């Protein structure tokens, strides 16, 4: 039996009737806060892409090194798991 939380969805912007009652200074503060939130999400997305790329390149390097010294099976395992995890993350982002 799961707990049911019937919370209303949180709106990013206030309703138009609420905005009409606010001063222009407060409206500007709300819009600036929304801009900062968008910039923060973009910064985290870029950082995640950079970290993911570095990890994938590292696993590609390790896999190449292992293949050169004669450990082909281990190289395949390392490269396969890293590529499959990147593909899995891309699919989850599309679905979510």
Image (tube, rainbow, N blue to C red):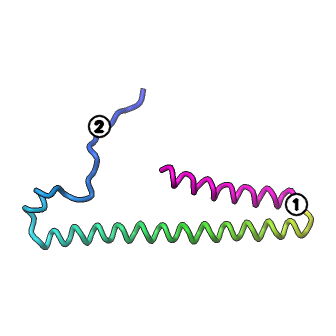
Question: Residue at the spot x=34%, y=67% of the render?
Answer: 37
Single out the residue that lies furthest toward the left: 21
Q: Using a 10 Å C-alpha cutoff, classify the residue at mark 1 as few (fewer than 14 neighbours), some (14 to 19) or many (20 or more).
A: some
Question: Residue at the spot x=79%, y=55% of the render?
Answer: 77
Going from N to C along the chain, the mark reached first, 1 or 2, is: 2
Above or below 92: residue 38 = below
Name the residue beneath numbered marker 1.
Answer: 72
Question: Residue at the spot x=62%, y=69% of the render?
Answer: 53
Indicate left or right for 49 with 16 as reference. Answer: right
Q: Position of residue 92 (x, y in %)?
A: 54, 51
For the stretch drawn in magenta, the main secondary structure is: helix
Q: On residue 6, which mark appears?
A: 2
Single out the residue that lies furthest toward the right: 70
Question: Residue at the spot x=27%, y=51% of the render?
Answer: 10
Q: Give the quarter of the image for residue 71.
A: bottom right
Q: Which residues are magenta?
A: 71-96
């Amino acid at each position: 039996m799961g707990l049911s939380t019937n919370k209303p969805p949180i709106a990013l912007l206030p309703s138009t009737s609420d905005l009409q009652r606010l001063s222009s200074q407060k409206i500007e503060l709300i819009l600036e806060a929304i801009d900062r939130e968008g910039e923060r999400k973009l910064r985290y997305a870029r950082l995640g892409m950079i970290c993911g790329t570095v990890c994938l390149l590292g696993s590609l390097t390790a896999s190449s090194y292992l293949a050169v010294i004669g450990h082909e099976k281990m190289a395949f395992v390392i490269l396969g798991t890293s590529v499959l995890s990147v593909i899995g993350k891309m699919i989850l982002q599309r679905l979510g």
